[in-house]
Amino acid sequence: MESCHNFFTCRRKSVLLVTVFSLLVTAISWMAAAEKPNVVFILSDNQSYYELSCHGHAQIKTPHLDQFAKESVTFSHFYAPPYCSPSRSVILTGQYAMSSGVFTTIQGRSILHREKTTLADLLGEEGYTTGIFGKWHLGFSYPYRPEDRGFDEVFIHGGGGIGQMEDFYGNTHYDPTFIHNGEVTPSKGFSTDVLFDRAMDFVTKHKEEPFFCFVPTPVTHSPHRGPKALVQEMKDAGMDGDLELFAQVQNLDSNVGRMLAKLDELGLAKDTIVIFASDQGMNDRGAPHGGNRLGIPYDPAQHVPFFLRTPGAKAQVSQRLAGMIDFFPTVLDLCGIEIPESVDGLSLKPLIMASEGYPEDRTLIVQCPRGRTATKWKNASVKTDRWRLVDGAKLYDIQADPRQHNDVASDHPEIVQQLREKYEAYWEDLPDPETTLSRHILGAEECPRVVLNGMDWYEGSSPWSSGHFRKPGNGKWAVTVETAGTYTFECRHFPREAKKPAGASHARILIGDVSAETKVDPESEFVTFELELKAGEYDLQTWLERDGKESGALFVYVSAD
């Protein structure tokens, strides 16, 4: 009996020790999770601040986002660059868009410069698994693709919107084709549903480790297309207006609800920062007070929703001025990661946690040239909690005049001068635009095959939509030949997947001072040139003679032998 007694005593001690050890491991795991919270960022595309029922839209119903807003720190005065690529560049770098070489959405100036460190880069260094599901729009050739910029899993469409020239040929929101880790991947279903399915699979797969799940949806970028059944349901209910747009937003809301439910199901909600925002303001479209198309540098083009739910923060509405440039440092701060000194934005953690440390009178600068060159003061807005200085000359008191109808610059010259000085310091600190031009890298060992698209012509015409297949124009790519050798250039009017003849009778190519030309069978889909090239930086231009007129090859597939 004694031995039996000792056995059970030892067993109880062992169980106790195991239990204590288990509790200790759980506590350590919980502390580690708290130190490295997951991040889910859902970004809508071209959705107005007012296209939510909680923000007063008369017809759109967004119950899931409305509830999420109630659980979050929401910012009522949050501003983003007024175009897709510039907004995404500040999201991923925390720096002014022009610092990253991103001036617009096409024209070779929508590409995030290769020297910039992204949020995905930094999170990856801290043990996060990173994934992007949706729209990229910061460069589609090496080394500018999301897989080159810190993302472990990539599931994206091309161009700035589904169906644009750089997207998979013929793509629509219904059964779209995506690119998954470099592979063409057809899908079944509505685009947003497919993206959230993939994003939720990612979250499920990586539930035991910290992750960054970025879901930049194509909603509500034109052309507006909603789920067909939902659009029909709205028609049957007698609704009027842009029902395709309304259906897009309501479908997005349903998918946000699905994602939040998945986080609850997996037990991750308490360990996950969840953020919802739109990338630009869309001129107050759908607002109860009506739209307001004042122009690029005015608040209606920049005002976006921003909801953030994070462990340890109480739901509240912040009236303080903030912007998309703050996203990068805020996420790092909430994840306990050091913020680089190069960041132009500010961490919103003091506002989120209701603590001290946010400036009493914040100055925020938003500028988007919307072209290939940067001009001082063009499309520039200098903001404080009370004032807006537009284009360096017009001053608005937002507290008294939120719709920016009355220029009061002559009444407050001292305020104008103060804000001009803020802008001057910002402008002086911007790099030389020549140094931020992103060149496509040819012949890199990491990626010997590169596809160039006319949307990235940095000089000449500015094609971007499928309509430009009819009137393509011509232009130049900025390229770097990394290694000397023989290069093959496959020049096409249509991309490979289109399987359409180029319709060209003659073709020529020029890269640096190396040129070639040849006759072409109009029924051929492409023409190929083999050129011996030296390493260096060059302009690349092509010509296809079609119906007696010359235009550039919209697609060039480059391979290094």
Image (cartoon, grey):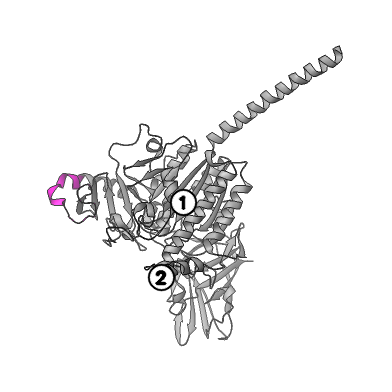
In the image, which residues are magenta?
Answer: 399-417
Which dot marks residue 283? none
Residue placed under numbered mark 1 in the picture: 64
Q: Residue at x 64, y 29 (%)?
A: 25
Residue sitting at the far bottom: 548
Q: In the rendered image, is residue 469 in sight?
A: yes
Decide: is 192 above or below 498. Answer: above
Q: Quadrant of residue 448?
A: bottom right
Q: Residue at x 59, y 56 (%)?
A: 198
Residue placed under numbered mark 2 in the picture: 462
Q: Position of residue 456 (x, y in %)?
A: 46, 66
User: 157 or 484, which lies in front?
Assistant: 157
Q: Quadrant of the N terminus?
A: top right
- Which residue type carries mark 1? His
Left or right: 66 with respect to 202?
left
Q: Position of residue 250 (x, y in %)?
A: 45, 59
Q: Quadrant of the C terminus?
A: bottom right
User: 391 or 5, which lies in front?
Assistant: 5
Q: In the rendered image, is residue 435 in sight?
A: no
Q: Quadrant of residue 437?
A: bottom left
